[in-house]
Image (spheres, helix red, strand yellow):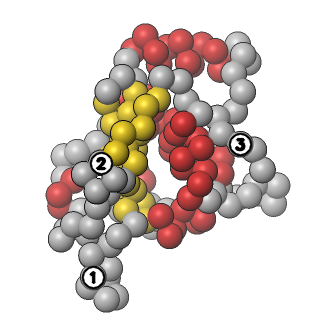
Amino acid sequence: MGSAERRARLEDVHALARGLPHVTVVDGTSGNPVYQVGGRSFIFFRTPRPDALDPVTGERLTDVIVFWVASEGDKQALVQDESTPFFTTAHFDGHPSVLLRAGRVGELSREELAELVQDAWLSRASARRAAAWLASRADGADAPAGPQP
């Protein structure tokens, strides 16, 4: 991470997700935010589950964020790289997503987080919406998602 890049913050997850086109936010089962595009979730804040435990205390993790990814290969690249804070659990075997504890968001730069959020959106958006958004970026017509530092 370069010196000009700032660390990501939890509020960046929300701002970046909301800044993408056609996004709706629905309440999950415990009132947790679920970000959707076209009715398809791409990021959600997970409720504590027995499969995600703190390795030190053994307590259920209360701050897990789920990000969709484009493929199993993308998932494996993220979770197998020990330099990243991403992980998975057996519950998500075969599911195209990675997990990140909210308390570890700051291990990413804002730019890295923006790429993760955008990739999650792209993996769930319709082909038409994804193509239109990508074309707008290629034309330089879009502003960066979310507030800037």
Q: Are marks 2 and 1 in contact (CB under 8 Å)?
A: no
Q: Which mark is residue 59?
A: 1
Q: Residue at x 60, y 50 (%)?
A: 12
Mark 3 lies on residue: 147
Q: Nearer the viewer, residue 28 or 37?
A: 28
Residue 65 appears in view: yes
Name the spot of residue 128 as percent of width and height, x first: 43, 10
Asked where in the image residue 57 lies, by quadrant, the reply is bottom left
The tag earlier along the polypeptide, 3 or 1, is 1
Left or right of residue 105: residue 6: right
Q: Is residue 101 above or below residue 69?
A: below
Q: Is residue 96 above or below residue 65?
A: above
Q: Nearer the viewer, residue 80 or 144?
A: 144
Amino acid marked by disc 2:
Gly
Q: Secondary structure at mark 1?
A: loop
Mark 2 lies on residue: 28
Q: Secondary structure at mark 3?
A: loop
Q: Residue at x 82, y 55 (%)?
A: 4
C-alpha separation, residue under disc 2 versus residue under disc 1 = 22 Å
Amino acid marked by disc 1:
Glu
Amino acid marked by disc 3:
Pro
Q: Residues within 10 Å of mark 1 (few under 14, many from 20)?
A: few
Q: Residues within 10 Å of mark 3 (few under 14, many from 20)?
A: few
Q: Which mark is residue 126?
A: none
Residue 114 appears in view: no
